[in-house]
């Protein structure tokens, strides 16, 4: 939509991502951090309610999660970090200041590589810091018709990590790719559910548009309220168009905060510069500076899993299809499982493709699905070997898998119990001829050179034999029948 | 004897309870009667929890009867209203917290209770501990038991007055810039502010977090040691509390200070010091020398910057600490307000006193964009210089001796309209607070019939040394030729 102007203007985007950390307890108190589905105001104590006289105690696990994230984003972890008070008055903030990190965050100077259409962009990571979340406000109409605001303090004091990127992003597509890849990474290292719909991942964007060849200035627009990656892309595209339009009309671009409105598909001004907050940051006197020892960082680094990029590169090297690999590494448990299947003897290419498509379908269809995958990886490896040898057809492999999930039996046992494959020439030939006879259109398509017609006819044979035919033998039979006719 | 139990020290009362001379209920009743008869004139208490105290006393007696003991078992103590007490109204003497009943006990309160103490009630103070005369209480002023026209000092004025008027055996206070030592000096009791971090601040309602420290007000040095032993120690709920071993403070008080090097800084004996107060303090130092201590002159060159430094840092922290009082969750509420901003303005306008408002404004200004470096950052740098003055001095001396206050207690109202004059009454207590050092006030004489104090300051966590020197002086001093307290005059 901005292709014409995009050549004349330079787009500068930086992203600020808030991530709710998955920890046992809240950031500064002992309340359970997992308040999902809890009744409002049941996960609270004097500390996260901001009662007079309470003091914060730093959650070690939250600090570890932040350092893990920093390491995964190639950041430096300085030896000293500190917490600061960010003062602002809003009813969702219990103390009317938020404990955050101002000038000495836990992680600095990292980078994150993002791919769009095969091209890689390196996005600088300015900093990753830790702070506390606010309570949740719900605006309602009271019984008497008056507007009212309800406060749920369960979220107050939950650990919140903020990842700030450098303004290295140039297109909405890059921003979306950054977000999606970051979400996968956060899940990969286990620090967050990173679900946008629950608010566990929230992305704000800073965006400005400058005439090509002119220096990039200070003025930028902050865009908030995007609840999905799609919304992020749309909001940025809208802003590019809006700001480009202003530039072309010779109008100034104001420093402001704008909110994305999903319904109207537009951003709207929320706060201009003259109303910008003065947060009056100062060092949190209730918390001594945090000494992050090298041993702690080394231990966290050593315990990090291999990063998705590395695992993906390995799998592609072993001739797994790129698209399937990209899909697979979105999901750490499934990737670990796939690697174990490969380790148990399956070929990388087959394992990846089959697991991403067939296996995941069956897995997701399981009722009462727990976190663990119930089938030992070696069993899947042996099923894939049977399939590779042609002793089990694709259709049958799917059925065998369903039975494995349902009964917990071994692949070989199920295949044996189902009886041998039909590979007797006479029996198959009869079926093949029947199928050819009944599907004249497909036969015509095949003769017209449409490759898919052969697949269709094979499928019909498989259906009649309930998957017990050897696919190789069927393919050869049909082909020779069609060629000879 | 029984009707004068309220006159006892903690350690004397403990002896009486252990020997069965009297019960905790008798002792507690004696104090409640005393409160009943004098507090109308002193104004030391904001809340008296008589029923709770008698219940705790009866429980202590039962426990003792079954063979149990505790360092404070059955001993009645008063709590400054800045300490959070579960189920007992806690206001910090502010109208904005009127009706606030906290759901939890401060760690210091829990430790007192675990040691068996009986809690008599909550003492008066300057609102949110901001003040030096107790006149900034949002409820009523407390008065000096020696002369009811005079202030008891502040901000722990109620605690000091309660001890001096024998309305408790001892009291907890809090000291941010002198709020334990200054009223102790003006009321003639012992006041101890330990090292920053020695006693947990959890449940101590914050004024200036980097300076606030719980302290004790007692009738003698032995009692201060006894209380400190109960209160001191690391608390996992306070990240600034020190993980340092807690010695047997009371066990070491043998009065031997031979070879103790006492530092005396001319900066504390200059302009503004009442000559009679100076003489009294010098006489006390001579007494210490008579016990085998040596005196050395030291220099604390940045002393004069302590006042402005404190009045940037403390209000800055206070401006954030007090932001939570908005009428939403506790204390005053305003159902008439039509929106949040109006509600907040009305609650704060009504709930905060003028001194609190002044400091919130000073602090908000000092932290504002464009002023932060010039005020807050610079003040922190000066604070480091003040701290290093002491570090240098303590290379040559063991304790520092100084006056606590430049002059004895002043008339109620005398400095109320002159904040700077009021601030100057803390000029000798601020430096040790900024440096986080343990320090004490010990009565050392009378000027114009009013008590004055000797201040002793020690290096971090050298409370034992401080108590030892204070106890030695106290023994050498003996009973001061004191005038009759106004509160005891017919």
Image: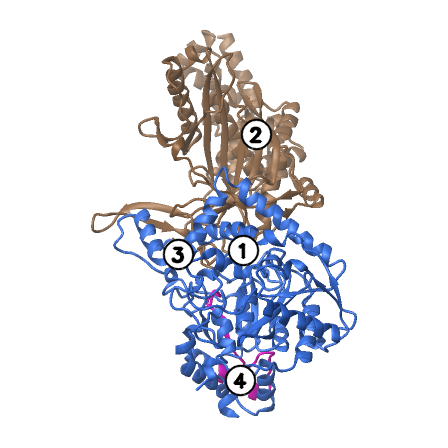
Chain colours: A brown, B blue
First-in-chain label (1 vs 4): 4
Q: Indicate left or right for B439 with A219 as reference.
A: right
Looking at the image, is B373 positioned above or below residue B262?
above
First-in-chain label (4 vs 3): 4
- Structural distance between the alpha carbons of marks 4 and 3: 37 Å
- Structural distance between the alpha carbons of marks 1 and 4: 35 Å
Instruction: Tell which of A127 and A84 is nearer to you.
Output: A84
Q: Residue at x 51, y 92 (%)?
A: B2
Which label belongs to residue A320?
none
Are labels 1 and 3 assigned to the same chain?
yes
Does the image show residue A389? no
Badge 4 element: helix
Q: Give the number of the mark in front: 1 or 3.
A: 3
Q: Which residue is mark 3?
A: B354
Q: Residue at x 42, y 61 (%)?
A: B416
First-in-chain label (1 vs 3): 1
Q: Give the number of the mark in front: 3 or 2.
A: 3
Magenta segment: B56-85
Q: Position of residue B404 (x, y in %)?
A: 59, 66
Q: Give the number of the mark in front: 2 or 1.
A: 1
Instruction: Tell which of A327 and A451 is nearer to you.
Output: A327
Q: Which residue is mark 4?
A: B7
Are labels 2 and 1 assigned to the same chain?
no
Looking at the image, is B380 positioned above or below residue A381?
below
Q: Residue at x 43, y 73 (%)?
A: B149
- Structural distance between the alpha carbons of marks 4 and 2: 98 Å
Q: Which residue is mark 1?
A: B209
Q: Which residue is mark 2?
A: A392
Looking at the image, is B472 positioned above or below residue B436?
below
């Amino acid at each position: 939509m901005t292709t014409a102007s995009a050549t004349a203007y330079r787009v500068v985007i930086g992203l600020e991502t808030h991530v709710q950390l998955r920890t046992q307890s809240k950031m500064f108190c002992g309340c359970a951090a997992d308040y999902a589905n809890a009744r409002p105001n049941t996960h609270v104590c004097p500390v996260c309610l901001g009662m007079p006289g309470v003091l914060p105690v730093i959650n070690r696990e939250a600090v570890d999660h932040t350092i893990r994230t920093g390491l995964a984003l190639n950041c430096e972890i300085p030896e000293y970090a500190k917490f600061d008070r960010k003062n602002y008055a809003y009813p969702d903030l219990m103390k009317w200041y938020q404990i955050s990190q101002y000038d000495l965050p836990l992680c600095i100077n990292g980078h994150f590589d993002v791919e769009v259409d095969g091209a890689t962009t390196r996005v600088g990571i300015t900093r990753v810091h830790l702070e506390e979340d606010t309570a949740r406000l719900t605006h309602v109409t009271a019984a008497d018709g008056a507007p009212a605001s309800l406060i749920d303090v369960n979220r107050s004091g939950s650990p919140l990590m903020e990842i700030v990127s450098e303004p290295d992003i140039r297109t909405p597509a890059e921003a979306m790719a950054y977000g999606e890849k970051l979400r996968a990474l956060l899940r990969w290292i286990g620090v967050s559910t990173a679900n946008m719909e629950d608010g566990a991942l929230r992305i704000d964007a800073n965006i400005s548009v400058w005439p090509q060849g002119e220096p990039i200035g200070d003025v930028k627009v902050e865009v908030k309220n995007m609840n999905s990656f799609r919304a992020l892309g749309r909001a940025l595209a809208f802003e590019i168009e809006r700001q480009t339009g202003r530039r072309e009309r010779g109008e100034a671009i104001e420093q402001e905060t704008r909110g994305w409105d999903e319904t109207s598909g537009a951003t709207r001004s929320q706060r201009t510069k003259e109303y910008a907050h003065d947060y009056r940051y100062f060092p949190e006197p209730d918390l001594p500076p945090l000494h992050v020892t090298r041993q702690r960082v080394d231990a966290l680094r050593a315990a990090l899993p291999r990063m998705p990029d590395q695992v993906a590169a390995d799998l592609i090297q072993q001739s797994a299809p790129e698209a399937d690999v990209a899909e697979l590494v979105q999901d750490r448990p499934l990737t670990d499982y796939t690697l174990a299947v490969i380790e148990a003897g399956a070929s990388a290419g087959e394992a990846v493709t089959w697991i991403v498509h067939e296996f995941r379908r069956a897995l997701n269809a399981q009722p009462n699905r727990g976190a663990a995958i119930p089938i030992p990886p070696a069993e899947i490896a042996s099923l894939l070997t049977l399939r590779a040898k042609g002793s089990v057809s694709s259709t049958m492999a799917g059925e065998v898998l369903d039975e494995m999930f349902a009964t917990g039996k071994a692949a070989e046992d199920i295949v044996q119990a189902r009886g041998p494959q039909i590979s007797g020439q006479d029996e198959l030939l009869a079926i093949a001829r029947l199928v050819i006879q009944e599907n004249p259109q497909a036969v015509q398509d095949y003769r017209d050179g449409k490759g898919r017609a052969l697949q269709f006819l094979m499928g019909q044979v498989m259906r009649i034999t309930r998957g017990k035919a050897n696919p190789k033998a069927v393919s050869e039979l049909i082909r020779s029948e069609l060629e000879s006719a | 004897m029984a009707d004068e139990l309220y006159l006892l020290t903690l350690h004397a009362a403990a002896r009486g309870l252990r020997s069965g001379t009297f019960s905790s209920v008798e002792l507690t009743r004696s104090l409640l009667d005393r409160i009943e008869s004098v507090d109308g004139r002193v104004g030391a208490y904001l809340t008296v929890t008589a029923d709770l105290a008698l219940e705790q006393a009866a429980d202590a007696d039962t426990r003792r009867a079954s063979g149990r003991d505790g360092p404070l078992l059955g001993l009645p103590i008063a709590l400054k209203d800045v300490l959070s007490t579960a189920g007992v109204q806690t206001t910090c003497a502010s109208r904005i917290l009127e009706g606030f009943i906290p759901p939890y006990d401060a760690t210091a309160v829990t430790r007192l209770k675990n040691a068996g103490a009986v809690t008599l009630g909550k003492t008066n103070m300057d609102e949110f501990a901001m003040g030096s005369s107790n006149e900034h209480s949002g409820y009523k002023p407390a008065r000096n038991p020696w002369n009811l026209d005079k202030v008891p000092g502040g901000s722990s004025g109620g605690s000091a007055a309660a001890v001096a008027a024998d309305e408790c055996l001892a009291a907890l206070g809090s000291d941010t810039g002198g709020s334990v030592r200054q009223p102790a000096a003006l009321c003639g009791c012992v006041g101890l502010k330990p090292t920053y971090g020695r006693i947990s601040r959890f449940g101590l309602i914050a004024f200036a977090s980097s300076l606030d420290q719980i302290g004790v007000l007692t009738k003698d040095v032995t009692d201060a040691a006894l209380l400190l032993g109960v209160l001191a120690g690391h608390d996992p709920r306070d990240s600034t509390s020190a993980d340092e071993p807690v010695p047997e403070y009371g066990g070491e008080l043998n009065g031997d200070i031979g070879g103790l090097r006492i530092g005396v800084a001319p900066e504390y004996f200059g302009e503004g010091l009442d000559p009679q107060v100076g003489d009294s303090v010098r006489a006390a130092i001579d007494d210490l020398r008579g016990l085998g201590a040596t005196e050395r002159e030291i220099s604390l060159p940045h002393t004069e910057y302590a006042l402005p430094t404190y009045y940037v840092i403390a209000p800055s922290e206070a401006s954030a600490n007090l932001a939570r009082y908005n009428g939403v969750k506790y204390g005053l509420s305003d159902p008439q307000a039509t929106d949040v901003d109006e509600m907040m303005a009305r609650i704060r306008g009504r709930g905060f006193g003028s001194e609190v408002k002044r400091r919130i404004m000073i602090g908000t200004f000092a932290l504002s964009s464009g002023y932060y470096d010039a005020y807050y950052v610079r003040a922190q740098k000066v604070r480091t210089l003040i701290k290093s003055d002491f570090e240098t001095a303590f290379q040559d001396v063991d304790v520092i001796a100084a006056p606590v206050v430049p002059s004895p207690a002043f008339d109620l109202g005398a400095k109320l309209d002159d904040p700077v004059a009021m601030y100057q009454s803390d000029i000798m207590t601020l430096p040790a607070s900024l440096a986080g050092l343990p320090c004490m006030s010990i009565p050392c004489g009378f000027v114009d019939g009013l008590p004055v104090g000797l201040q002793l300051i020690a290096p971090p966590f050298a409370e034992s040394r401080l108590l030892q020197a204070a106890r030695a002086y106290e023994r050498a001093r003996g009973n001061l030729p004191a005038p009759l307290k106004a509160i005891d005059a017919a």
